[in-house]
Amino acid sequence: MAAGLALIDKPEGWTSHDVVAKTRRLAGTRKVGHAGTLDPMATGLLLLGVDAGTKLLTFLVGADKTYLATIRLGASTVTDDREGETVSVAEPSALASLDAPAIEAALEPLRGDILQSPSAVSAIKVDGERAYARVRAGESVELPKRPVRVDRLEVLGEIRRVEADGAHFIDLDVIVDCSSGTYIRAIARDLGEALGVGGHLTALRRTRIGGYSVEAAQKLDQLVQQDGEPLRVLPLADAARAEFTVRELTDQEVVDLVHGKRLALGSIARDSAPEPIAAISPAGKLIAVLERSSNQLKSLVVFAGESDA
């Protein structure tokens, strides 16, 4: 199978590791990696590198992302989502006084460049051990705040007043555009805390990673069923064009890059074009990923000789 990126629409209940393992079998290679996991409860876009495509993942893990989520106000959980044990439930009177303007006011401080405390049940390591393992062992874990950016945090439609298991809640659907490393569960938690009623996620779907959309992804259940559709892999050059600045090469520049030489900036303006930069041959192949070095371009990764390079 050609090297590149596989875009997978993960269903609920699968771990990201499960999806990687299944993709290895579908692609017929052990060399498959991901550009960021999703919790089992979450659905949506997983970006997987296949063979030489794994070399692109380093440049994709930090890409901005878009999520659709449902936040439930009125209860807090250990995990900040519906998978965790409930630790508090608000009084109905506290929820009755909340309305859309009050919720909007509480959302405003969660937008822009903020310091966010990650959810305690996360893969972040504390003294060499995953935070979620410490929480499950009964420890109280408070992770230090870290800078993240929330470019968009909007309520979609009307808020909904619901009743479940004899308790009253408010559900709201939101769309979030954010930097890598942002915890949507933490947004739900912090919104609930700001309103004094608690909050957690009941649904989460990732719809975008950088320039890649879930609309172009294959549904995993259609791949794994008997006689299912074949795995599609986005070729390296197409994958790079979707996310990186492109520097078109001459035949001589292809030779120069393969031999470790640096290139002139050429069509890449010195300060304007974002990095990294994909170097594409006249034949439409990805030759290397570049970065600026003074007034030249140098290789970060060279793909010459790789399948579908």
Image: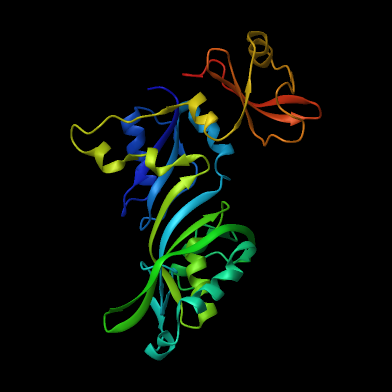
Task: Tell me if residue 307 comes above or below residue 112 in the rendering.
Answer: above
Looking at the image, residue 90 lies above or below residue 24: below
> Residue 216's spot in the image, x, y percent?
38, 38
50, above or below 70, in the image: above
Judging from the image, the colouring scheme is rainbow
Is residue 89 in sight in this rendering?
yes
Choose top left, top right, bottom left or bottom right for residue 71.
bottom left
**Which residue is rendered at x = 30% and y = 42% of the image?**
220
| Camera-nearest residue between 267 and 133 | 267
Q: Is residue 249 left or right of residue 224?
A: right
Image x and y of residue 68, in percent: 42, 57
Q: Nearer the viewer, residue 141 or 55?
A: 55
Q: Nearer the viewer, residue 154 or 145?
A: 154
Q: Check the picture and name the quadrant holding the N terminus.
A: top left
Residue drawn at point x = 36 percent, y = 50 percent: 15
Q: Is residue 120 visible?
A: no
- The percent position of residue 120, horizontal first and vertical second, equals 51, 67
Q: Measuring from the top left, give residue 109's x and y in whole percent.
A: 61, 70
Q: What residue lies at 56% left-to-right and 45% top-to-bottom? A: 63
* Residue most extreme to the right: 294
Establish if 233 lies above or below 287: below
